[in-house]
Every structure is written in structure tokens, then in C-alpha cells.
Amino acid sequence: MPTGACGINCDVCKLNLLGTCSSCGPGTSPQAEQKLAAQMRLLGGTCAILACAQLNRVEYCLRDCAQFPCDNFSKGPYPFSQGYLQMQERRRGQNPPAFAPDNTPVEVPSHFWDELQTRDLNALCNWTLFRPESDRQLVFQFLHEEVLVDVAGRCLKRDGGNGWEITPDPLLELVTVIYLNHVKKLYPLGADIVGVKDLKEAHFFQGPHVLQTDPLLQRYGQDIRGFEEAAQFLKGRAVDMADAAFELFPFPRVPLYYLFWQGDAEFEPRISVLFDRSIEAVFSADAIWGLVGRVSTALLQGPASI
């Protein structure tokens, strides 16, 4: 393949066209092994980036390694500038932008917050296992981290180390407010686990509304260990439902089940998402789509989102 483990695409390099230099290939490829052998033979040493990628079975550092950007990049002479590496580090620590199926930015309508202002927060805590923090504030566990719902301030907050701070996360904000506005009682869990085709609004999940699992396959399709590490980092509970499967909790009483099949000579790897039937009582189809999208994004970020 023309793209090296470091991320450089040799397909667009004149040195490759001239035959002066060949691609290193992904860290797991035969090209990488051949390149390292040639470097040792001709140069007496190897590229630290390529050697590390091969040793750790990483295809592409930028996509697959939780340690990127590491010292091999920041202290080495190539291939990226310090400015580029600093940009990568900064943006990897931010919540990614959220878009609706029509590619418009996600926004929380003000009347959703208006409605939440009228709800009994003590009752909501009993039904959802959120906990009261102070007047008009609730805290819940979102996967591996605590998030505060500031009802009076109309925002979500996270603990940045010096107290609760506003952290823009529009998709999580939207599904959180929808959930709190629609929950009406303590719904039993575990009676019926279903897929999208079993939901009452199954027709919704087609075309632009199909669950967005393709990015997960691009990242983890050949890396089941990476998928397991990401799910465990998010406090997922392993379940015996596929080659690798985890029960994840975006809200304390709203489980999602991510099922991963590695694939073989006949079938491509695939990922499915299952739900507890109770999800239909509190989320419409479009909100379920958004919730899955936000959890999938967290899986893509994985341990690198620390």
C-alpha cells in the first residue's frame, strides 16, 4: 500500500514515481518488513517510527496508536513539523464536531431546556440514577467520565481539574436533554435485547440514517484488541454475544451493546449495535441514531481521549 505507517502517502511523491524510493507500507505489511531490512542493510539502522509500528502491530500511527504523537515524531527529524504535531495533540483532546444526517451542525433547541426547567429533578434522579449535585444540577456517568447537567445554566459541564467547566458537546447535550424530558418512570432492563430491525421505527434506519459503524470498521476491522481496549477504557462490560462484545452505558440505565465479528475468508468484519427494548420509551429513532453516533465517537477516540 502507498501510505506508510507514519501517514506519508508515497503515491503522490515523485521519488516513488522515479523508483528512487519505495513505500514503507503500513506497520503490519510485508512492505514494512522489507523496508526495515533494507534500511538496516544499507544504512545500518532503521526508522524508529516504522520499527515501532511493526513491533506493536500498528498499521497507521495517526489512526491506530493511542500514543500519537509520541517522541518518535516530536524528537525525530521527520516527517511532521512541531506545529502539525501540536495541532494533532490539541484537537485530539477536544470533542469532535457533531452533525445531523443532513450534515447541518447539531444544536439543542431552546424549548428543550425550557421543558427541562419544569421537571421534578428528584424524580428524574430516582428514574435515571443521576445524582443531585446542587440546586438545579444533576451528575451522571457517561461511559468512563462524570458529566454535570446544569439545568439553570442550560449546559453540560465536566471536571477540568479545577471544578466543573463548560465543555461544548452538542450531540451529548441534545440526547441528554431529550432523555431527561421523556423519562417517566424506572424502566426494567434486560427483558428484551433488540437490533434496529426490531425497533418500532425500524424504517428510519436507512439511507442517511443508517447507524454509523463504518468508521469503527475502518479503525478496528483488523484490530480486535484495539476495539476491546477502547471498550474497556469506556468502562464497557464484556458480554458473550460475538467475537468481542461489550455493554456500554452512555447513561446509567441506558445500555448499548456493541458486537464485533472479526470476519474470515468468506465474510468481512462487521459491527452491530443492539439495544434494550426500554430505549424506545425515552428516545425517538433520530435520538437513538444520535446516541449511537456519540458512543461510536467515544470508541473511535478510545484511550487517546484521556
Image: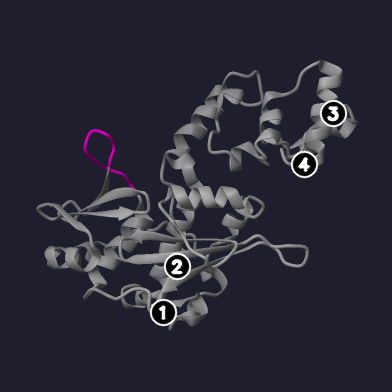
Question: How far is mark 4 from mark 2, CA to CA?
Answer: 36 Å
Dot 2 lies on which element? helix
The numbered disc on residue 49 is none
Q: Which of marks 1 and 2 is in front?
A: 1
Counting from the top left corner in percent of width and height, residue 224 is at: 61, 53
Dot 4 lies on which element? loop
The numbered disc on residue 192 is 1
| Circle 2 residue | 289
Counting from the top left corner in percent of width and height, residue 262 is at: 65, 60
Instruction: Please give left or right for residue 266 compared with residue 294 in the image.
Output: right
Question: How far is mark 4 from mark 3, CA to CA?
Answer: 17 Å
Q: Is residue 126 visible?
A: yes
Residue neighbourhood size for the residue with mark 1, other residues' Cα within 10 Å, grouped as few (<14), some (14–19), many (≥20):
few
| Circle 4 residue | 29
- Amino acid at pointer 1: Asp
Outermost residue on the front side: it is 240
Question: How far is mark 1 from mark 2, CA to CA?
Answer: 19 Å
